Image (cartoon, helix red, strand yellow):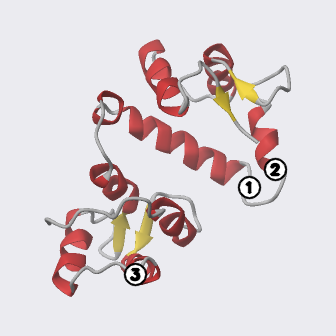
Amino acid sequence: LLVLPAQGVDYRTTLDRQDEEHTGHIPRAALRHALRELRGNLTESEVSELELRFQGAGQDSVHYLEMLHVASPSSPLTTSEVWRHEEKLRLLIKKDFQWRVPGKLRKVFRHFNVHRKPRITEADLSGGLKALKFRLSAEQEHQLFMVLDHDRDGLVSYP
């Protein structure tokens, strides 16, 4: 597939909305619906190629998180396997803490930030992961923190 994703388009949110069970997989019909919503200009054969390349566990399933990862710009952090841990944590938060309900997401961060400040240090992240029984090596925790620290200020900020 030689089509590049458009810059500035929020593919992630549109595809996440199709993933009601928070599994990282969506039905083929949901992928097609999301692509129409995004006004993608892919041909039928290109969409079929995406469905085949990122086929999930079931015949009708597409692993859209893998697709997003492959389509995103690469960096030393995204070329390692740390993105899988980031996605696993993201799905855990979505599933277990009902992130779509206003205010519920803040409760999740209490696992990470016992001081109740709207930012998380690397040590807070490590402690929160352990509290959630999310086991990673020290190196994997560090890489995950680097991915989550978007502005590189040494803190993960949240609303």
Q: Which residue is mark 1?
A: 98
Which class describes the residues within 10 Å of circle 1: few (<14), some (14-19), or many (20+)?
A: some
Figure label count: 3
* Residue at 30 percent of width and 28 percent of height: 76
Can you tell which mark lies on residue 39? 3
Position in image of residue 32 (x %, y %): 37, 81
Question: Do the numbered discs 2 and 3 sit on residues whose CB atoms are within 8 Å?
Answer: no
Gap in Å between the C-alphas at discs 2 and 3? 32 Å
**Relative to 22, residue 144 above or below:** above
Q: Which quadrant of the rendered structure holds the N terminus?
A: bottom left
Amino acid at circle 1: Gln
Residue 39 relative to residue 42: left or right = right
- Seen as rendered, the residue at the extreme front is 8
Q: Which residue is mark 2?
A: 104
**Relative to 149, residue 93 above or below:** below
Question: Do the numbered discs 1 and 2 sit on residues whose CB atoms are within 8 Å?
Answer: yes
Q: Quadrant of residue 47?
A: bottom left
Secondary-structure class at tag 3: loop
Position in image of residue 70 (x %, y %): 27, 51
Question: Do the numbered discs 3 and 1 sit on residues whose CB atoms are within 8 Å?
Answer: no
Amino acid at circle 2: Lys
Q: Which quadrant of the rendered structure holds the C terminus?
A: top right
Residue 79 relative to residue 34: left or right = left
- The numbered mark, 2 or 3, whose residue comes first in the sequence reads 3
Secondary-structure class at tag 1: loop
> Is 126 or 3 nearer to us in this picture?
3
- The numbered mark, 1 or 2, whose residue comes first in the sequence reads 1
Which class describes the residues within 10 Å of circle 2: few (<14), some (14-19), or many (20+)?
A: few
* Residue at 48 percent of width and 44 percent of height: 87
Amino acid at circle 3: Arg
